[in-house]
Amino acid sequence: MFKNRVTSLLCPSETVTAEQLETDRRILAFDRAMQHLNRRGFLGAMLSAAAVATVGTREAHAQTSTPSVVDVLNFALNLEYLEANFYLIASTGTGLTATQRGNGPAVTGFTTKLALDAPTLAVCQALAQDEVNHITALKSTVTSLGGTPIAQPAINLAANGTITTQAQFLAAARQFTALGGSAYVGGAQLLVSNAAVLTAAGQILGAEGQHAGSLAYLCVNQGVVSPMIDAQDVSPTATNYFTVDAARALSPLRTAPQVLGVAYGVSTRATVTPPSGITMGGFFPSGVNGNVKST
């Protein structure tokens, strides 16, 4: 029965097909590439990214004004769309509806429900519902501020390989949720002009922390290797469930050039800051939506 199966690189207690093994290799290769990123960069810092991407001299568009609260929230929506679809497809086989994604395109690359055990499925379903609720809350807030919520951009969930096993799902999910906290931490300084929005961001941060803790626990207890996403990240192990800064016990604060560099798949092992002017690729093959979209 296991004639053509080999040991998983992410979960040594499991055997996988050659195709699944290739996805394991891509996930681990992604880990190695992240080691040389600047210590303040990754995909999940969508709120902090909006701040940095529009300020300073390194950005491609040379924007000098502080981003609006609407810009910050709309930038965050890109990642929320990414995560919500990931968890929905893994648990149900169907992503966001056309209405939920603002009539943006459906995701590609991962469209099949996974065979998850009961505890993992329960967590996945809860994650999916939370991310859908975050999308609803962000859109409502953007609208209340007189802005227009962005539609879902084109998303390729198989940018680092198609997810087909429970181990691969947990490895990737842990990485996605590791970003969430740092996004809202980084975005806080851009939201101080609106106390209600800042409070809501703090509430989302609390939810993201619970997500990260649950997935770290599942990874450790199932023997799943979830590689570091960058130099700040800490992979969960049997002696380290909490993936925070060991010296200060604080969540990372990540910023923009590296965020989009990783999202677009242009950052490499030797990259400290990705090349400027990249506007698409990786998880977002046509780029993200909103006013912040270039490395």
Image: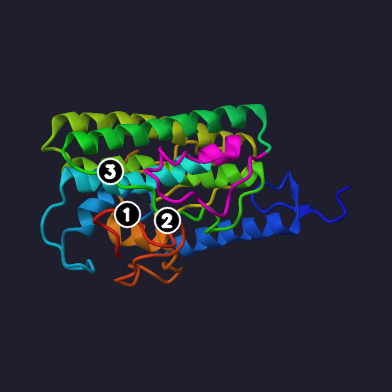
* Residue 133 lies in the magenta-colored region: no
The span picked out in magenta is 87-114
Looking at the picture, which amino acid does disc 1 mark?
Asn
State the image coordinates of residue 6 (x, y, percent, origin top left). 78, 55
- The residue that appears at 29% across and 37% down in the rendered structure is 139
Looking at the picture, which amino acid does disc 2 mark?
Asp
Q: Main secondary structure of the magenta part?
A: loop
- Residue under label 3: 149
Between residue 277 and residue 256, name the one nearer to us.
277
- Residue under label 2: 230
- Residue under label 1: 289
6 sits left or right of 144 in the view: right
State the image coordinates of residue 115 (x, y, percent, origin top left). 68, 37
Q: Quadrant of the C terminus?
A: bottom left
* For the residues bearing labels 2 and 3, Cβ distance under 8 angstroms: no
Disc nearer the start of the sequence (2/3): 3
* Residue 99 lies in the magenta-colored region: yes
State the image coordinates of residue 79 (x, y, percent, origin top left). 38, 47
User: Can residue 239 be seen in the rendering of this structure?
Assistant: no
